[in-house]
Image: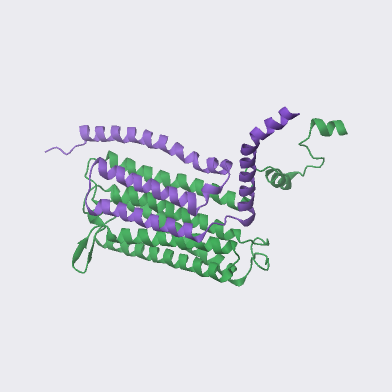
Amino acid sequence: MAETALTNPGESPALAAGWQGIAADWSSDQRAFKNVSWGKAMMWIFLLSDTFIFSCFLLSYMTARMSTTVPWPNPSEVFALEIAGHHIPLILIAIMTFVLISSSGTMAMAVNFGYRRDRAKTAVLMLVTAAFGATFVGMQAFEWTKLIMEGVRPWENPWGAAQFGSSFFMITGFHGTHVTIGVIFLIAIARKVWRGDFDVERRGFFTSRKGRYEIVEITGLYWHFVDLVWVFIFAFFYLW
Amino acid sequence: MTNVAVHLEGHQPSLHAHMHDTIAAGATHVEGQQHPIKLYLVVWGWLFVLSTGSYLVDYFGLHGYLRWSLILLFMVLKAGLIVAVFMHMAWERLALVYAILLPPVAVLVFVAIMVFESEYTHLIRALFFAPVA
């Protein structure tokens, strides 16, 4: 018996069969990421997959823009605004960038106060982050409305290459969806923090597990990623 | 015996440094990514400066390679700051850092492939589908 155990050290005596067996095998005790919890590791892996999605969008935009023989509309002019009689190029996008960066700053501080178990400050900072996010989405809705009124469609626009519209709606629409989901995520977690779920170890209604303040950091990872994607969209779509 | 002692002594600084690192890494883990608020504020400030920089590239209408290199420079610096400090990648173990940051590098290969493809498509369109006067 001892010999069997030595030659087959990885085999436990009773292996579950069927669906339970599948679940047991996949959740077996093997970790690659030593001091990172599964929640954080999984969020990172999700973000990695999301990176590929946005990479594909930006790549298809690059391909469309490089291969068209029709001139590409000048984003600097397309996204310009008249403010108090002044014609300012790209100003709305610049403001949106600053709003999103500010939301990342408040999020980073929320994570910090979360680990200090400062319930009120964490919740308030998360709600401020959510408010910045909602502002961003609002400005994006304004931008979409303006462009649609000016005649931009996924198949045509008044200024040049038809692919401009499809790239624009696809990329900014997908990013805006991410921001919207992030705002909902932030509000849900902020509510839990405010209620003190992580201090009294209240079980979640969905998972029936005790939460920890680490969820604030995990939410933060998602939020910072949304900001990170905007950095690339801002550079490649609006500035290039 | 003396020999051994001398030998050990010679290694002590590096050993000590290593132990210190391990302890420091363990400590960060226990407290769960605790860093001074000031660090976040400094990074926040830098992100504002860099964003202003990239906006000014457009505002002053720089063009050509200067424009593109400045845009890419500001973009990479901003992305680096967000990932390293805000997302705490600078303090994670290398196993996680490499697992997450290396795969996106493969996207650059995809970029190269699509650049070839676009050039080819553009050439064919210019040759055969150009508007005839």
Residue at (30, 42) in percent of width and height:
B69
Instruction: Give x and y (percent) for residue A152.
Output: 27, 56
Q: Residue A206 appears at what percent x and percent y?
A: 64, 62
Between residues B25 and B51, which one lies in front from this camera angle? B25
List x then y, in percent, for residue A199.
65, 67
**Residue at position x 24%, y 58% in the image:** A89
User: Among all residues in the image, which is located at the extreme front?
Assistant: B2
- Image point 41% across, 37% down: which residue? B108
Q: Which chain is purple?
A: B
Q: How is the image coloured?
A: by chain
Residue A166 shows up from this direction:
no
Residue A158 sits above or below residue A60 on the image: below
Kindly tell me whether residue A85 is visible in this rendering: yes
Q: Which chain is green?
A: A
B118 lies left or right of B41: left
Q: Quadrant of residue A18?
A: top right
